[in-house]
C-alpha cells in the first residue's frame, strides 16, 4: 500500500485546482430550472452533506456525499461482510469484506468514482465549486415525454447525458458514455421525487444497459442532510505512512 499512498499525491495535481466552470447559457437555463423544481438555489446553496441508506439490487447500502468538495463513501453490506469504497478528491480506495485495504490510481477507475461523487452530489448545481463543462444536446422524446438533454462533464470525470423533463424540470434520465461496440449505453431512470427538508430528491433509480444482464434497482429509504465529515472520505493510512491528502 505504500506505493498506492505515494501515487495519490501526484493525482491531486492532475485532478485538483480551482473550479473554472464553463456552462453554455442554454445549459445553465435548464439546470437553473431543475434546481428551482427541487427546492431552489437558496435551499441547495445551504446544503452541506447528503447521507442515504437503502437497498441496491436487494443489498443494503449507505452512501455519504459532499456537495462542497469531492467526497464519496459507500458501504455495502454483502453476505460476506461490509465492503467500503471511498473517494476524497484524490484517489479511489476500498476496504474489502476481509478487511484488506486496496484502491486504484488508474485514471479510468478514478474518473468513474469522481463522476459518481459529482453526479451523486448534484455537482452541476454548483458551478462555482466544481470545474465542469455543460452544453445542450437538444430536445429528445422518450415514453411520451419531451426532454431537454445536456452533456455534462466534471473535470477529470466521465461525461453523462442528463435528460430533464420539459414539463416538470426534473431530471428523468442519465446516460453514461463509453459503451463497448454493440453494447447499449448504461442508462439510469431517476424516479420517485420526495421532499427532504427544504429540497426535493429522487428516491428510486433503475439502471440498465452496459454489461448488466438485468435492470438494477436502487431504492433510497432514508436521506439526511447533515454536514459531511471529511474524515470519512479518506482511508486511514497504514502505520508509518502519511494520511491521504484531502481535496
Image (cartoon, rainbow, N blue to C red):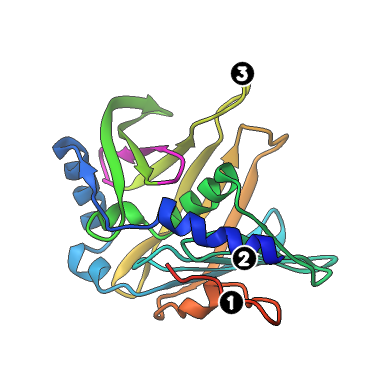
Decide which of tag 3 and tag 1 comes sooner along the chain. 3
Which of 22 and 174 lies nearest the eye of the viewer?
22
Q: Secondary structure at mark 2?
A: helix
Q: Is residue 67 above or below residue 140?
A: below
Name which residue lies at 49% across and 42% down.
189
**Quadrant hosting residue 219:** bottom right
Query: Could you say where residue 141 lies in the image, as x and y percent from the top left?
Result: 36, 25
Q: Is residue 140 above or below residue 168?
A: above
Name which residue lies at 60% across and 37% down.
208
Residue at the spot of label 2: 5
Q: Are marks 2 and 1 in contact (CB under 8 Å)?
A: yes
Residue 242, label in figure: 1
Query: Could you say where residue 218 lies in the image, as x and y percent from the top left?
Result: 59, 54
Tell me the CA gap for discs 2 and 1.
8 Å
Q: Residue furthest top?
A: 182
Q: Residues within 10 Å of mark 3 (few under 14, many from 20)?
A: few
Q: Is residue 203 visible?
A: no
User: What segment is highlighted magenta in the picture?
Assistant: 156-169
- Asked whether 138 falls inside the magenta stretch, the response is no
**Quadrant hosting residue 30:** top left
Amino acid at each position: 500500500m505504500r506505493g498506492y499512498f505515494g501515487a495519490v499525491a501526484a493525482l491531486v495535481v492532475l485532478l485538483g485546482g480551482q473550479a473554472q466552470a464553463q456552462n453554455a447559457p442554454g445549459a445553465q437555463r435548464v439546470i437553473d430550472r431543475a434546481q428551482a423544481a427541487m427546492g431552489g438555489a437558496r435551499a441547495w446553496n445551504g446544503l452541506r452533506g447528503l447521507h442515504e441508506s437503502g437497498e441496491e439490487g436487494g443489498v443494503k447500502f449507505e452512501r455519504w456525499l459532499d456537495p462542497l468538495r469531492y467526497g464519496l463513501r459507500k458501504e455495502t453490506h454483502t453476505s460476506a461482510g461490509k465492503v467500503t469504497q471511498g473517494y476524497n478528491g484524490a484517489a479511489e480506495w476500498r476496504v474489502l469484506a476481509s478487511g484488506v485495504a486496496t484502491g486504484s490510481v488508474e485514471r479510468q477507475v478514478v474518473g468513474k468514482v469522481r463522476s459518481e461523487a459529482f453526479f451523486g452530489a448534484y455537482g452541476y448545481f454548483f458551478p462555482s465549486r466544481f470545474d465542469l463543462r455543460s452544453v445542450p444536446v437538444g430536445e429528445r422524446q422518450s415514453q411520451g415525454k419531451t426532454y431537454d438533454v445536456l452533456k455534462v462533464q466534471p473535470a477529470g470525470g466521465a461525461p453523462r447525458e442528463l435528460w430533464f423533463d420539459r414539463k416538470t424540470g426534473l431530471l428523468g434520465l442519465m446516460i453514461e458514455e463509453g459503451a463497448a461496440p454493440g453494447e447499449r449505453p448504461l442508462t439510469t431512470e431517476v424516479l420517485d421525487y420526495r421532499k427532504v427538508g427544504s429540497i426535493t430528491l429522487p428516491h428510486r433509480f433503475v439502471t440498465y444497459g452496459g454489461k448488466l444482464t438485468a435492470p438494477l434497482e436502487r431504492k433510497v429509504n432514508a436521506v439526511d442532510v447533515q454536514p459531511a465529515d471529511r474524515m470519512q472520505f479518506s482511508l486511514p493510512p497504514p502505520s508509518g505512512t502519511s494520511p491521504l491528502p484531502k481535496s
